[in-house]
Image (cartoon, rainbow, N blue to C red):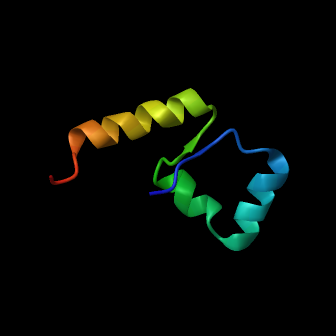
């Protein structure tokens, strides 16, 4: 899974041209800051741990 935080404007433009920005934004994987992205990732890991 890809999570992105703190996208600079020029990087957002590249993602738009690649056609990935809309998908990432719609799936809630773009965060304004890294701590928010980390919190999201931790919640995912705790909710659905990998099998042992």
In-front residue for pair 26/48: 48
When the figure is inspected, residue 45 is found, relative to residue 35, above or below; the finding is below
Q: Is residue 7 left or right of residue 51?
A: right
At 54% from the left and 62% from the top, the residue drawn is 23
Marks counted in the figure total: 0
Q: Quadrant of residue 45?
A: top left
When the figure is inspected, residue 27 is found, relative to residue 30, above or below; the finding is below
At 63% from the left and 60% from the top, the residue drawn is 21
Question: Residue 42: percent from the left, percent from the top?
Answer: 37, 35
In the image, farthest residue toward the bottom: 18
Q: Is residue 51 left or right of residue 8?
A: left
Question: Residue 15: percent from the left, percent from the top?
Answer: 71, 62
Question: Residue 26: percent from the left, percent from the top?
Answer: 50, 54
In the image, farthest residue toward the left: 52
At 46% from the left and 54% from the top, the residue drawn is 27
In the image, farthest residue toward the front: 52
When the figure is inspected, residue 32 is found, relative to residue 22, above or below; the finding is above
Q: Is residue 29 left or right of residue 45?
A: right
At 53% from the left and 49% from the top, the residue drawn is 3
When the figure is inspected, residue 24 is found, relative to residue 36, above or below; the finding is below
């Amino acid at each position: 899974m890809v999570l992105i935080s703190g996208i600079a404007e020029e990087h957002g433009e590249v993602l738009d041209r690649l056609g990935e920005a809309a998908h990432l934004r719609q799936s809630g994987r773009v965060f304004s800051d890294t701590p928010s992205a980390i919190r999201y990732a931790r919640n995912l890991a705790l909710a659905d741990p990998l099998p042992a």
